[in-house]
Image (cartoon, helix red, strand yellow):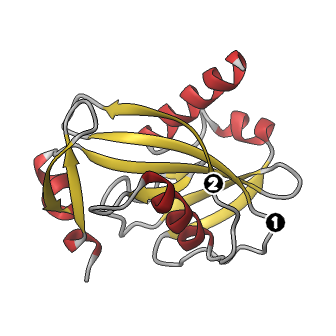
Amino acid sequence: MSAADEILDIVDEHDNVVAQSPRGEAYAQGLRHRCVFIQARDAEGRLFVHRRTPTKLVFPSLYDMFVGGVVGAGESYDDAALREAEEELGVTGLPRPEYLFKFLYDDGAGNTWWSAVYEVRCELPVSPQVEEVAWHDFLTEDEVELRLRDWEWVPDGLAAYERLRAYRSMG
């Protein structure tokens, strides 16, 4: 099954399931669905940063400071966070990612999804999927901040990153 054929729950503005749709149709029609964003840090506290492959359905070839993806139909955010983190990092046996908060991403141009933000410590050697990740490294927070204005980042990840900074500054 291709990624475009994966079935997603379609949700309303309150994150209640109202329908189901193949992923490709959900993207093409701008149907609101669910996604998870997991900030992965190594044993030294550095952030996993990667560049998406040019073949990705959404935001090809852009940089991201999260691993993650869509929540499948009937799947919980928590289960999707663990599945996506292990898939994208290319590891098994990660601790369950810690849920932080959820927000509604809407770019005003037809891309909208409920976004659950998590964090996880990955002390295992990573081997990211070559189909999803064109380049990766673990960067310090300062290194990420320096690259925010120079690299082209996925807009939803950037929105999640800004909200995560605000969330941490309140705590």
Residues at marks 2 and 1 touching, judged by CB atoms closer than 8 Å: no
Query: Please, which residue is most extreme toward the bottom here?
Result: 1
Q: Where on the picture, by quarter, is residue 74?
A: bottom left
Whether residue 152 can be seen here: no
Residue 138 image point, x, y percent: 76, 57
- Residue 131, above or below 79: below
Residue 49 image point, x, y percent: 65, 54
What is the three-letter code of the residue carrying label 1?
Answer: Glu
> In the image, is 100 to the left or to the right of 2?
right
Q: How far apart are marks 2 and 1 (CA)?
A: 13 Å
Which of the pair 141/11 is nearer the observer?
11
Precedes in sequence: disc 2 or disc 1: 2
Q: Residue at x 58, y 51 (%)?
A: 38
- Neighbours of disc 1 within 10 Å: few (<14), some (14-19), many (20+): some
- Residue 131, above or below 30: below
User: Which mark is in front, 2 or 1?
Assistant: 2
Query: Please, which residue is most extreme toward the top here?
Result: 170
* Label at residue 97: 2
The N terminus, quarter of image: bottom left
Q: Which residue is drawn at 32% across and 55% down?
A: 58
Which of the pair 162/8 is nearer the observer?
8
Number of callouts: 2
Residue that numbered label 1 is attached to: 123
- Residue 13, above or below 26: above
> In the image, is 24 to the left or to the right of 153?
left
The C terminus, quarter of image: top right
Residue 119 image point, x, y percent: 65, 47
> In the image, is 30 to the left or to the right of 37?
left
Tag 1 secondary structure: loop
